[in-house]
């Protein structure tokens, strides 16, 4: 009886670890490299800006600025640059975060 329970537990543990391994490989394969970094959010006059840096020195990176209840602005940053990106006015909500996207 103990032997059967031990075999069942070992089978469950092995299948769970295999499932986790394949799930982490699948999620890593679909993600874009995390090159675009937010330096700061700020207002200039009545306009909202975010200062972004491309930490990848070998390639251009793409991004999307996530703003609640508004169309999300997106763009590209050339390799190794820092740029102030305008994404709305002070009447619109502040951006929640910047998402790295594949180009």
Image (spheres, helix red, strand yellow):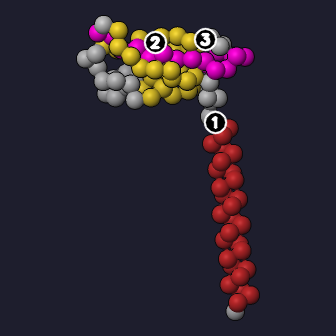
Compared with 32, 3 (above or below) is below
Please tell me which residue lies in front, 56 or 72: 56
Tag shown at residue 85? 2
- Label 3 sits on a secondary structure element that is loop
Neighbour class for label 3 at 10 Å: few (<14), some, many (≥20)?
Answer: some
Q: Position of residue 60 (x, y in %)?
A: 65, 15
Q: In which quadrant of the rendered view does residue 67 lie? A: top left
Neighbour class for label 2 at 10 Å: few (<14), some, many (≥20)?
Answer: some
Q: Which residue is mark 3?
A: 81
Q: Along the horizontal axis of the image, is 90 left or right of 27?
A: left
Q: Read off the magenta span.
A: 46-61
- Label 2 sits on a secondary structure element that is strand
Tell me, yes or no, whether the highlighted magenta stretch contains residue 59.
yes
The residue at 38%/25% (across/down) is 95
Residue 66 seen from this side:
yes
Q: Which residue is mark 1?
A: 30
Tell me the quadrant of the picture where the C terminus can be found. Answer: top right
Tell me, yes or no, whether the highlighted magenta stretch contains residue 50.
yes
Tag shown at residue 42? none
Compared with 80, 16 (above or below) is below
The residue at 66%/57% (across/down) is 19
Q: Position of residue 52 (x, y in %)?
A: 52, 17
Please tell me which residue lies in front, 24 or 52: 52
Compared with 15, 65 (above or below) is above
Question: Disc 1 vs disc 3: Cβ atoms closer than 8 Å?
Answer: no
The residue at 68%/78% (across/down) is 8
Q: CA distance from mark 1 to mark 2?
A: 26 Å
Question: Disc 1 vs disc 2: Cβ atoms closer than 8 Å?
Answer: no
């Amino acid at each position: 009886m103990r032997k059967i329970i031990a075999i069942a537990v070992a089978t469950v543990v092995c299948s769970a670890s295999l499932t986790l391994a394949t799930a982490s490989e699948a999620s890593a394969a679909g993600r874009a490299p995390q090159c675009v970094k937010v330096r700061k959010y700020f207002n200039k006059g009545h306009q909202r800006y975010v200062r972004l840096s491309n930490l990848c020195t070998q390639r251009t990176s793409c991004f999307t600025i996530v703003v609640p209840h508004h169309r999300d602005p997106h763009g590209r940053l050339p390799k190794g640059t820092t740029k102030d990106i305008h994404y709305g006015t002070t009447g619109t909500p502040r951006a929640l975060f910047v998402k790295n996207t594949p180009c």
